[in-house]
Image (cartoon, rainbow, N blue to C red):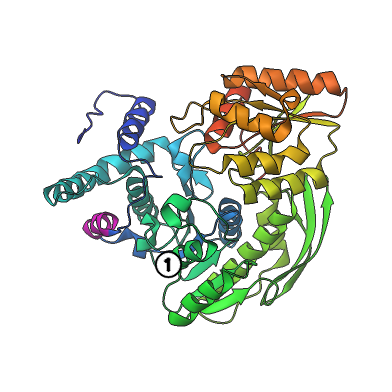
Amino acid sequence: MTDLDLGGLSLEEAEREIYAHIVSRNPEHDFEPTLDRVREACDLLGSPQHAYKVIHLTGTNGKTSTARMTEALVREHGLRTGLFTSPHLTTVRERIQIDGEPIAREDFVRLWLDVAPILHLVDARSAEAGGPRMSFFEVLVVLAYAAFADAPVDVAVIEVGMGGVWDATNVADGEVAVVTPVGLDHQEWLGDSLADIAAEKAGIIKDGAAVVLASQSESVEPVLAAAIEERSARAYREDDDLEVVERQPGVGGQLVTLRTPAATYTDVFVPLYGPYQAHNALLALAATELLLADGGAPASLAGETVEAAFAGVSSPGRLEAVRTAPLILVDAAHNPHGIEALVTALDESFAFETLVGVVGILKDKDAEGILAALEPALAHVVITASSSPRAIPVEELGPLANEIFGEDRVTVAEALPDAIDAAVQRSERDSDLGAGVLVVGSITLVAEARVLTGADRRKGTGQAR
């Protein structure tokens, strides 16, 4: 399909048609190491990615929460913001946000009509050279950059899709680069070692940029340090220039004291669970200080501005309560590193007597590592699968769960609604008041669980990773 006839369609129908067309392209996990098509499309559109300042984020876990907190801090300073994150849970418009809200349906359709001719031209030129059409993710990146220039925004906070060097977002030049903790994920595309993955992610660091670094493993730090030196960038490192001085878990989140290069922010409430969220908030603060400093020394932020920005932060699908009695949580953790952080947050912030997991995992993920990390936290696990063609079939995932949990702690349910029902019954059978259910293992599974529970229709719910 090269053209869409949207005449006569409602805006909702037009959005569905546009999304169906974009999805028909190579999926975002079909990684190809080139920026040529995205760069050509942006050039033809007048280089929209250079029309605003950019904070660029990479890493393995924590990117989305850090991006959301950074965007909230920048917006609270009266600047118009764009936010590009992935993946989405309910509508693709969630990936392209302006001033903290998904792009309006009418604007999305108009944007497509404006940009589609350029995309088709790039497709045709690529085909003539024997190459592929622009991929799903490449198209979304171009749409986002065009939308932000059209708004227009003052600052765009951009989360990479995967990696850095060859990520489609990397046609932008970030004044500030943020690297969250680097772990093993997407090895098929990024490399089998932490050093290889770090080298890919370091690709977002531009000449002369300011770089905010989370605490990294011993094999990652030298790779990032070499990239920073090569590009004459300025580094601000956690545990050196930045520090979570103190944090106190509480109802609905935690109270934190954070030290950055410019200031110490005391007793700030972050409405998110888990130690990692305090560290994400720290990175967001440092990145915002550096952006507002505009190339100079980091600028301290007003305490009331920081408090107001963090107070409204959420990220649906990340340690989000979607139902009570029993409490059902959904979390998009999909690699062992993310699961370990999730388990820590559960132990710290919830007092479950019985927690039953509903777990579905995609084929390119470390299923054994995910299940092993979940095992200490779950009394029982219900194995299921999302509707994604990449989902591991239950007849394959079930036996692996049996090996890790033991057969008496494993139930298999082909369909997600049946899996959630089985988990609820199991949790309530074993506990009257302290029962809980955790849906986890893949973003597609969490997205479908949110639809089933109606959480996708409720605004402002959720806890973020």
Q: Is residue 163 visible?
A: yes
Image label count = 1
> Is 170 in front, or is 59?
59
Q: Is residue 465 visible?
A: no
Residue 430 in the image: state x and y as whole percent. Answer: 85, 22
**453 left or right of 162?**
right
Q: Amino acid at mark 1?
A: Gly
- Say which residue label 1 marks: 203
Residue 136 in the image: state x and y as whole percent. Answer: 34, 42
- Up-down relation of residue 392 to residue 303 (above or below): above
Residue 192 in the image: state x and y as whole percent. Answer: 49, 57
Residue 209 in the image: state x and y as whole percent. Answer: 47, 75
- State the extent of the magenta-drawn residues as a range: 36-45
Q: Is residue 40 magenta?
A: yes
Q: Is residue 114 magenta?
A: no
> Is 453 in front, or is 406?
406
Quarter residue 346 falls in: top right
> Is 16 in front, or is 183?
183
For the N terminus, which image quadrant?
top left
Question: Could you tell me which residue is drawn at 61 percent across and 38 percent down?
Answer: 317
